[in-house]
Amino acid sequence: MVTANQKWAIVTGGSIRGGLAISRTLHSRGMSVVVHHGSTDSLERAQVLIDELNSIRANSALRWQAALEDHPAFPYQDLDVSVVVCNASRLSMTNCADFEQGLLDFRIHVTGHAALLSSIEEKLKRNHGSIVGITDIQVDQPNRDFVWYHVAKGGLETLLRALAVQWAPDVRCNIVAPGPMDWHEGWDDEPRQHAILSSTPLNRTGSFVELASAVAWLALDATYVTGQVLKIDGGRSIWLK
């Protein structure tokens, strides 16, 4: 049962890795959370998180399954949404000629999130809401072999910076661009891991809790910050080595 004074956050891709930490952190800050996931493959994982959050505070979490590439509108129009975290992502190796894969990347990262945001634009404006996008420091420092991922993440940054102007002064829009985070499960390329850490001034990966803390600060606390890209990367983006 939804109550009149609940403030809701939507976290796309909110049941795994960084999205999981963001969902938990916003919930711990008193927000009710809609955990988005993309397919039935992630349904069980998302439901475990929903049950966890509702056990902490009753009726404070909902699950939303939708493929962002289909440009879904947000279905729960009775919810008082004031925060959206555009976190859902797809990381796939592509070359310049991989146009179909590029279009899929663009639909997930950019136009899929745009469809969600446009469907709740008036609600966000009424609530003086906040949007935070999760991108990547590789937008500015591209890695090899991930052409369309970089292009799409760059598109998400530009979308939110444009909305920071168009939807001002009612809605703040910012971006968190992480660098090396907790390694993907099963990725054990030790030489590559060493190379990454040796070019990171803090000499470690970041944690998803640290990522989530930055997102929560931008979403809830940084009331005079909009249109900005905050790099959470242990200094990697400033060190030429």
Image (cartoon, rainbow, N blue to C red):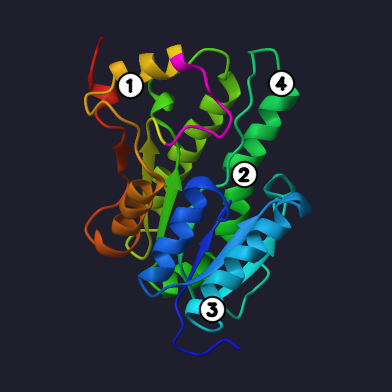
Q: Residue 180 magenta-drawn?
A: no
Disc ID at residue 197: 1
Q: Residue 95, relative to residue 114: is it above or below?
A: above
Residue 77: x %, y % from top left: 62, 75
Q: What is the quadrant of residue 224 in the picture? A: bottom left
Q: Residue 180, relative to residue 59: is it above or below?
A: above
User: Residue flagged by tag 4: what amino acid is it?
Assistant: Phe
Residue count near mark 4 (Cα–Cα under 10 Å), binned few <14, some 14–19, many ≥20: few
Residue 88: x %, y % from top left: 57, 46
Q: Secondary structure at mark 1?
A: helix
Q: CA distance from mark 2 to mark 4?
A: 16 Å
Which residue lies at the image location 57% right of the left edge and 20% below the top edge? 146
Residue 165 visible in the shown view: no
Disc ID at residue 55: 3
Residue count near mark 2 (Cα–Cα under 10 Å), binned few <14, some 14–19, many ≥20: many
Say which label, 4 or 3, has the lower sequence index. Answer: 3
Residue 92: x %, y % from top left: 64, 26
Say which label, 1 or 4, has the lower sequence index. Answer: 4
Say which label, 2 or 3, has the lower sequence index. Answer: 3
Outermost residue, top side: 241
Image check: 232 left or right of 103? left
Disc ID at residue 99: 4
Q: What is the quadrant of residue 223 in the picture? A: bottom left
Image check: 95 left or right of 229? right
Q: Is label 2 in contact with label 4 (beta carbons under 8 Å)?
A: no
Residue at the disc numbered 2: 111
Residue 11 visible in the shown view: yes
- Nearer to us: label 4 or label 3: 3
